[in-house]
Image (tube, helix red, strand yellow):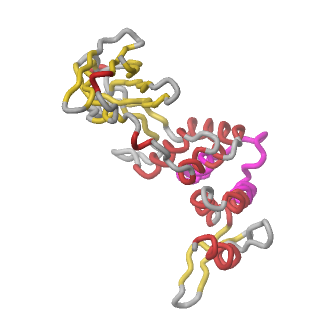
Amino acid sequence: MFDDWWNRTARSEYLGFSGAEPAPAVTFYYDPTIDYHHRLPVSLGGLFPAYYLATQQPADARALFEAALFQMGLTDLGAPIAPPGPRGTAIVIHLAREWGMAALADALGQAADERYEPTWDREGGEFTWGFGLDEEHPRGQYNAAMAAAEAMTEGAWHRLAQVLPSERFNQPTVTGIDFPDFTLTQAWWDGERRRLVLTSTGRAEADTRKPTTFRVTNLGDPSGWTVEAEDGGPVESSAVDGDLEVRTTIGTHRLVVRRA
């Protein structure tokens, strides 16, 4: 249904596609009551749809993105780059990484680092951008978009929407983390070697070495599994209520759950 609506209506009437290229100004808002299209330059009105279309109509999304880059003056990486606002910057970095445009993503990321106040709150264990807003609390939407852009790898946006989870929900799963004092930076099920690889970190230095526990589910008989700390940190495990309970300390560890 979406593809039909896109090809019959939205593509031409809203975004002005003629062949493979969008219009210089596209619909930002349509009022059906008075049949009026409020149009904005593709650098704004096309950039945001490109972000959401990238997983469904990647060719048209890429065309919108490249038209927006041209209008914003972001095609010449030999010149100094000005970040196109907090949300626009996040979208451009996100999509540039999605489509393997590493030079653009790196150049804009550097400009963002210089202007958008990336800050580590070491005591609270939180990384945020201030964006020059001088607000008491970091702006949530802007930070969420920038964090997603930082985490992007080539093709990941498409895979997130289009690749089925397969057996993921039946694989060994970690539960009961003492978040936010204790967090996992990796939880990877290595199906070939039949092991669950975990890396952890603590939120604040003051919490380091405090005891913490979590559980691993979907192991079948948990008594047949054990946990090793490849970093040499303290770790014990035992079967509890059908799960494997892991006892360790808050801090940076690399743990491997494997058959005993």
Q: Nearer the viewer, residue 155 or 170?
A: 170
Residue at point 20% right, 28% down? 240
Quarter containing the C terminus = top left
Magenta stretch: residue 80 in it? yes
Q: Nearer the viewer, residue 231 or 38?
A: 231
Query: In the rendered image, is residue 185 in sight?
Result: yes
The x, y position of residue 142, in whole percent, is 47, 50
The x, y position of residue 165, in whole percent, is 49, 47
Q: Which residues are magenta?
A: 65-94
- Classify residue 38 as left or right of residue 259: right
Residue at point 44% right, 33% down? 119
Q: Against 213, is 14 above or below? A: below
Residue sitting at the far top: 232
- Classify residue 72 as left or right of residue 212: right
Query: In the rendered image, is residue 89 in sight?
Result: no
Quarter containing the N terminus = bottom right
Residue at point 60% right, 39% down? 153
Magenta stretch: residue 30 in it? no
Q: Against 50, is 103 above or below? A: above
Residue sitting at the far bottom: 34
Q: Against 5, is 238 above or below? A: above
Quadrant location of residue 71? bottom right
- Classify residue 109 as left or right of residue 77: left
Q: Nearer the viewer, residue 160 or 238?
A: 238
Q: Against 5, is 142 above or below? A: above
The x, y position of residue 47, in whole percent, is 63, 60
- Classify residue 17 as left or right of residue 243: right
Q: Nearer the viewer, residue 102 or 8?
A: 8
Residue at point 40% right, 20% down? 256
The x, y position of residue 166, in whole percent, is 49, 45
